[in-house]
Image (cartoon, helix red, strand yellow):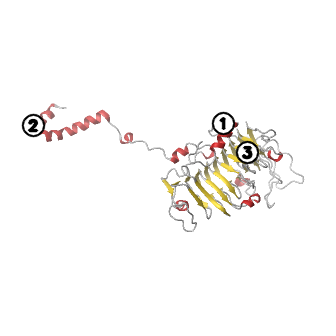
Amino acid sequence: MAADTVRHMRRSGPRRSLLALLPALAVGLGAVGATSPAAAKKPAPPTATSTLLTHRVGFGAAVTGGAAAPVTKVTDCGDNPTAPAHGTLRAVLTGPGPHSVKWATSCTTHLLAELPVPSDTTLDGSGQAVTLTGMNDEHDGLVVDHVANVIIHDLTITEFGIPANRQINDMPNGILVTASHGVWVDHNTLSDIGNKQVTIQTGTTDVTVSWNRFVGDEYQAQFFQIGNQMEGPSLGSVQNVTSHHNLYTAVGYRTPAIAYGTLHQFNDVVEQWVSTGVHCQRQAQCYLENDVFVSSGASNGLVGVKYSPSGAGCNDAGTLCDSTWGAGTVVNPYLPVAGTVAASSVEQPPCATPPVAPCSPYYGSGPQTFTPTYTYAPETAGETLRARVEANAGSHAIPTW
């Protein structure tokens, strides 16, 4: 401290001395431990959404959903499509986005109409037991239509459509994604759906479907479909889907089925299918890696991977047909039941005589050329992987990856 400052303190008394000291003390403290406001600010604790995003893999790895929004909690388990009550899921989603949605309590909601999911939305049921049901009504469940950036996580979706009509393509889907971009469907349990439990269609791109539990029943339902022959290659060829660590139990077929587009499937577990496991058809390109195929052992349940369309490749009405095969590479599958067929594609045989129009040439020549270029870490296919997927796939209060 300067000598003249000390002399002034002696002359002016205690109060003035203290006032004189303050500037000097401030300078001194600043020199000892200067800290900027940014450095002093404590980092915010991770949110549920930010933690969830660390598990993104595949074509949908850039999806953020409603991460930019504060969490809004569903507090009312009811549903009224014409006048949504405050606190219901439908009311939350009709407001301006983005939407980061969780539930304040465990909840079973009977959806009285299909529920549109807007862009930039996360539906996260973790921490509670959240069920969306149609109670066998004839409408879809969650509908992602011409939107972008959606996450559907940790829900139970059940009972859409009439059970007895499942074998004749009853229309409702559990999750229907149409002409959308950037969708992640993760850790959901799906059962008792009239048509497909999950449908991806009409040129939807950048999708990951992971850690879901697809549950079969006595009606041997269809499960997961990507594209169809009614769209044709002009729409369907851009579709790209990553499917990993999903569990299919006691299923019929389409686990998944893809027409056109690109599928990368790794570490999925397909158990006890009836007709076909993965169906890669109509110009689709599939890379199937380290998957588990547990056949029923019956003669019609041994085809783990199929490349030719069923029948003449026509829709149910017989009005649209495409008999083109798909192409695929199968890498290191686990096939515990002897006789299971899960092999890479080979050259398509000649078209039928007379040919079924349109009878297209084989898409490519020999095994297809698609291989994934993004970062991922497939596990070895075997009983350890099978047990881990059986334990962790589907909705849980605390999801595990």
SS class of the residue under badge 3? Answer: strand
Name the side, left or right, on which 33 lies relative to 50. left
| Image position, residue 18 (x, y; %) | 17, 39
Residue in the picture at 68% in, 58% down:
173
Closer to us: 153 or 33: 153
How many marks are shown on the rendered structure? 3
For the residues labelled 2 and 3, the Cα–Cα distance comes to 94 Å
In the image, residue 382 sits, relative to residue 92, either above or below, namely above
**Image-based side of 169 in relation to 45, left or right:** right
Looking at the image, tell me whether mark 1 or mark 2 is earlier in sequence order: 2
The circle on residue 379 is 1
Q: Tag 2, which secondary structure?
A: helix
Q: Is residue 371 left or right of residue 115?
A: right
Q: Residue at x 64, y 40 (%)?
A: 388
Q: Which mark is residue 11?
A: 2
Circle 2: residue type: Arg
Marked residue nearer the N-terminal end (2 or 3): 2
- Location of the N terminus (image quadrant): top left
Residue marked by disc 3: 271
Q: Are marks 2 and 3 in contact (CB under 8 Å)?
A: no
User: 188 or 12, which lies in front?
Assistant: 188
Name the spot of residue 75 as percent of width and height, x first.
Answer: 51, 59
The span from disc 1 to disc 2 (Cα, nearest Å) is 81 Å
